[in-house]
Image: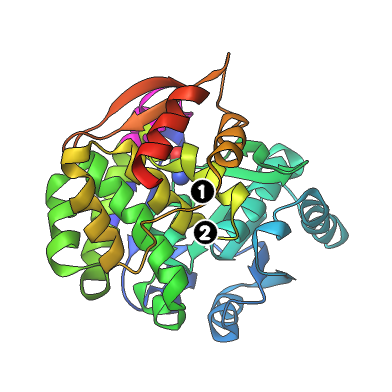
Amino acid sequence: MIIPVNLGKKSYDITLQRGALKRTGEIFDLDRKALIVTDKGVPKEYVREVCKACRDHVTVIIKAGEESKNLENFQKLCEAMLKNNFGRKDCVIAVGGGVVGDLAGFAAACFMRGIDFYNIPTTLLSQVDSSVGGKTAVDFCGIKNIIGAFHQPKAVLIDPDVLDTLDERQFACGAAEAVKMAVTCDEKLFELIETKGVKTNTEAVIEGALKIKAKVVEADETEAGLRRVLNFGHTLGHGIESATGLLHGECVALGMIPMTAPSLRNRLAAVLEAENLPTQCKAPSAKVIEAAMHDKKAQGGAVVTVRVDKAGSYKFVKSTGEELLKDYEEAFL
Ligand code: GLY
């Protein structure tokens, strides 16, 4: 299946198909140099498949984990391209999760003021969300994604078969982002996840999430307004992430709960629990709120939060730190 992302001259296709990894050479234009960026956690056979499709490639393998999304690794990628005489017509390919995609995409956005970028997401989280939409970045001075650029990929290849090797906890993190899309934008998709679960309907869930993502990005590529809906659960989620050792998707799951109306909250929590995600948070509220209010999107002591009163709908509400504290404590303490 092809899901188009219509952005004028920056339009591209997402190929969603079991076994698509073996078709990398058909789907991408690889008659040029390619920098393949991956991490140590990505099974070698996936990377080998991509290497086989390239005419001329250089591979950089980074350490797995958020701490790799830094300027040092960005420099490493740029150095690899310089040393290998990459030019404007060459390309970067990410093979991995969100960290690899964000870092590789940022190097592609900056090298020679922007070269082609292809993304092959290998985690559920990156397949349903981060591989599409052109957000690229590194973390800096302890702040997530603070240095970055919008740089749309040239194409995205999603092979759900690669999820067979993904560990349960990482799978659940992807499910959290899919629930986020469904509960804000698509009641039917929410009901599908609620009644059948993500595991047995992975392709349908990825497809539903990507269709939402494509529509949102087409309407608001650079997050001037509507795209903020994709931050549902992320304001408190980022605060919880700073205050705990939990994974991003787990924190997004927790972050959604206080932002959901009490009438829907138990239903949402049941869906998250069925997806092996946490629904109770004991992180100290002051620490969570302080970190949440340091969010790069906070302005003048307030942050725009996304709230859900009814499945498949959302509203934006400007909230102060005190208001967020009240929401958090009401939901968890
Ligand atoms: N992951 C949120 C966005 O792409 O805007």
The answer to whether residue 242 is above or below residue 25 is above
Residue at label 2?
119
Pick the front one: 163 or 47: 163
Q: Looking at the picture, which amino acid does disc 1 mark?
A: Pro
Identified at 77% across, 52% down, the residue is 74
What is the x, y in percent for residue 243?
61, 49
Pick the front one: 192 or 3: 192
The answer to whether residue 285 is above or below residue 75 is above
Q: Which span of residues is magenta-colored?
A: 216-228
Tell me the SS state at disc 1: loop
Q: Is residue 40 visible?
A: yes
Quarter of the image holding residue 162?
bottom left
Residue at label 1?
153
Circles 2, 1 touching at the beta carbon (< 8 Å): yes
Quick one: label 1, few (<14), some, or many (20+) residues within 10 Å?
Answer: many
**Which of the two discs, 2 and 1, labels the residue nearer the N terminus?**
2
Q: How is the image coloured?
A: rainbow
